[in-house]
């Protein structure tokens, strides 16, 4: 079975440590004051992260995934499209998967459609366009009424697709977005538009949304067992909606790193626990603001496919293959579970975290490219 | 509580509206705050001795149906203007608590003809000049709970009324109510920048009641309302935060009585 392997990094501000977090992140991750941010240090980190991307491109990763988060020390990417633009000019071959643009918080979906089209044209058709609702925190950051998030997501999505697929000019008078003339000169190189991805963790509603539209579903942050369930639901729902789907429409994001020996990889992988304790810390109100989940979805979420990933030790996570570490042979063997048994045609390798030494990450990428990826594809 | 009241579900105009109604006399329209309709409480009972009290649950709140076009506080005010025509109410005493006070003020600004007088209890709707309205939507429940009162021991049966564990059904309602408040008040945050200009034409006799230590809506806002409502008086209650009716019931009722008697 063919498999596409993507490189992913949150581009963390890795100078945040346990000491700082335990003292200052008392309430919620997005209340940690930005007075602790040092732009000089961030500049140095970006240099490393882009060297890693160039290496991933050169050694044969099929793609690089990028994303966007706000008020976050664990992700220094406040704009997915700016990140993608930098990737376009730093890479030659890889696909660039934007997962994704937070379309409900935008004031102007037509501008987003233009930007993504521009990236697609500039990159020679290498863009995968993901659309996301954003975490509740992204709504709060943008001061977007969370009760409007889902409606705006739907409407922005419809407007972007129409902008890409219809001849302009046309008029759009929806509930949240109004444009009297939609006629952007820039249209995507890939026709009718770039491949669309939609991510989810375990919400049934997300799986169904993607499947009914025939969009690829990426499982980002769930257990193997949950992924088995979402995979089944995805293909069944897509088939009912008349879409032919295969492994290429399903992806799985996994934390994984390679080193020359199992022992070295195991030690390197410990850095994956860097933000585990703090990233999702906060009162319920920060993760579930009023109206963010539809009344229907709140019911579904009550029946969420459990359990999540929180609260487990590094050793547990490695044992359960939720974090994959090892020499190239070990990693190939462990990953087969995901692409052969689960049937994920896309493996998104969350391969770098927090204070992992740059040199070790570069070596890991080299091993991915030279040994792991060819073996997975072979 | 008294027995002089009943709960009704009425159909108007495109959904079901939950309404607590009781008492005798001229009509009093009681508009609840962002948290929801508390039902028939002591102050309803007292007022029902002199008025027919109408205490509806806002559209989308409690047992009232959500109505899609009601998406802002001015839209709620338009809705209630329709309702009072539908119920043929005249010479109404308009009574609003917190967010209900904002709805009342918008209604008075739209058309004051149906109203005799207006009572605003710690209303939102105005942007404070010095302080700010407390963050309610993303603060933990306990934090908000602590802001509501100056001294919880002053609140009769506090544990049972305000701090007991909610049933699943009550949690669902609370969730719905929070969603409605967010959809109407998220931005600008609990105020209408134009309200002060709209209210300048309102000549209704008005009472503005505020807790001196209101931790949710700063007491300075009492003056902002008083400045523009030409026929208004202000009553500030000491040792009291955002819910004078619950925290200082005697002073609260005294203020109402002396205003209504005058």
Image: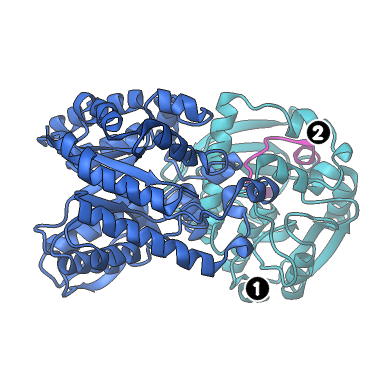
Chain colours: A blue, B cyan
Are the residues flagged by discs 2 and 1 in contact, CB closer than 8 Å?
Answer: no
- Left or right? Give the position of A265 relative to B253: left
Q: Which element type, helix, strand or loop, lies under badge 1?
A: helix
Q: Residue at x 19, y 27 (%)?
A: A340
**Residue that badge 2 annotates:** B158
Q: CA distance from mark 2 to mark 1?
A: 35 Å
Nearest the viewer among A189 and A21 is A21
Was residue B30 drawn as part of the magenta stretch in this picture?
yes
Nearest the viewer among A327 and B214 is A327
Q: Residue A48 at x, y = what percent?
A: 40, 60
Magenta stretch in the rendered image:
B28-46
Q: Which element type, helix, strand or loop, lies under badge 2?
A: helix
- Left or right? Give the position of A160 relative to B233: left
Quarter of the image that includes the N terminus of chain A: top left
Numbered mark located on residue B196 in the image: 1
Instruction: Please identify, in this view, whether the residue under mark 2 or under mark 1 is nearer the observer.
Output: 2
Figure check: B124 above or below A3: below
Numbered mark located on residue A191 in the image: none
Q: Chain of mark 1?
A: B
Is residue B201 among the parts visible in the rendering? yes
In primary-sequence order, the first of circles 2 and 1 is 2
Q: Residue at x 74, y 32 (%)?
A: B163
Was residue A270 drawn as part of the magenta stretch in this picture?
no
Is residue A176 among the parts visible in the rendering? no
Nearest the viewer among A175 and B81 is A175
Figure check: A360 above or below A374: below
Q: Chain of mark 2?
A: B
């Amino acid at each position: 079975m063919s498999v596409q392997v993507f490189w992913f990094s949150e581009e963390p501000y890795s100078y945040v440590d346990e000491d700082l977090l335990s003292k200052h992140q008392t309430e919620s991750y997005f209340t940690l004051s930005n007075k602790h941010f040092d732009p000089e240090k961030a500049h140095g980190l970006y240099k490393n992260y882009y060297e890693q991307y160039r290496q991933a491109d050169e050694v044969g990763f099929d793609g690089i995934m990028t994303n966007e988060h706000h008020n976050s020390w664990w992700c220094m990417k406040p704009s997915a499209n700016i990140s993608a633009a930098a990737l376009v000019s730093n890479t030659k071959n890889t696909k660039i998967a934007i997962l994704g643009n937070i379309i409900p918080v935008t004031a102007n979906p037509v501008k987003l459609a233009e930007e993504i089209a521009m990236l697609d044209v500039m990159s020679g058709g290498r863009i995968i366009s993901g659309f996301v609702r954003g975490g509740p925190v992204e709504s709060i950051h943008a001061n977007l009424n969370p009760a409007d998030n889902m409606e705006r997501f739907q409407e922005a999505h419809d407007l972007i697709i129409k902008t890409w697929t219809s001849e302009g000019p046309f008029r759009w008078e929806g509930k949240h977005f109004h444009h009297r003339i939609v006629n952007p000169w820039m249209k995507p190189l890939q026709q009718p538009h770039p491949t669309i991805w939609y991510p989810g963790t375990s919400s049934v509603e997300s799986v169904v949304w993607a499947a009914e539209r025939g969009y690829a579903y990426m499982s980002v942050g769930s257990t193997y067992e949950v992924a088995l369930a979402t995979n089944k639901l995805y293909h069944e729902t897509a088939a009912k909606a008349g879409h032919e789907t295969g492994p290429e429409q399903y992806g799985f994001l996994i934390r994984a790193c390679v080193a020359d020996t199992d022992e070295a990889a195991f030690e390197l992988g410990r850095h994956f626990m860097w933000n585990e304790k703090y990233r999702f810390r906060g009162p319920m109100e920060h993760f579930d603001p009023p109206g963010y989940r539809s009344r229907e979805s709140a019911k579904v979420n009550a029946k969420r496919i459990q359990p999540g990933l929180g609260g487990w030790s590094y050793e547990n996570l490695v044992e359960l293959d939720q974090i994959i570490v090892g020499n190239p042979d070990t990693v190939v063997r462990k990953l087969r579970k995901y692409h052969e048994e689960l049937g994920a045609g896309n493996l998104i390798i969350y391969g770098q975290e927090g204070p992992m030494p740059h040199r070790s990450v570069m070596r890991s990428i080299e091993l991915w490219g030279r040994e792991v990826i060819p073996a997975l594809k072979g | 509580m008294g027995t002089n009241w009943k709960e009704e579900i009425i159909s108007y105009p495109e959904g079901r509206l939950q309404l607590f109604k009781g008492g005798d006399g001229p009509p009093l329209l009681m508009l609840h705050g962002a948290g929801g309709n508390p039902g028939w409480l002591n102050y309803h009972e007292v007022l029902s001795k002199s008025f027919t009290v109408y205490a509806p649950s806002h559209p989308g709140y409690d047992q009232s149906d959500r109505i899609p076009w009601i998406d802002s506080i001015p839209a709620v005010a338009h809705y209630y203007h329709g309702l009072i025509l539908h119920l043929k109410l005249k010479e109404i005493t308009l009574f609003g608590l917190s967010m209900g006070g904002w709805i009342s003020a918008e209604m008075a600004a739209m058309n004051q003809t149906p109203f005799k007088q207006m009572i605003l209890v710690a209303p939102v709707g105005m942007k404070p000049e010095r302080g700010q309205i407390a963050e309610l939507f993303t603060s933990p429940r306990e934090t908000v709970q602590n802001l509501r009162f100056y001294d919880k021991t002053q609140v009769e049966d506090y544990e049972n009324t305000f701090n007991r564990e909610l049933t699943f059904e009550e949690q669902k309602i609370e969730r719905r109510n929070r969603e409605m408040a967010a959809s109407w008040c998220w931005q600008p945050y609990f105020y209408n920048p134009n309200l002060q200009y709209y209210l300048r034409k309102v000549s209704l006799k008005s009472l503005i009641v505020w807790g001196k230590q209101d931790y949710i809506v700063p007491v300075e806002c009492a003056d902002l309302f008083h400045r523009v409502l030409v026929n208004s008086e202000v009553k500030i209650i000491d040792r009291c935060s955002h819910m004078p009716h619950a925290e200082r019931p005697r002073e609260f009722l005294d203020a109402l009585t002396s205003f209504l008697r005058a």
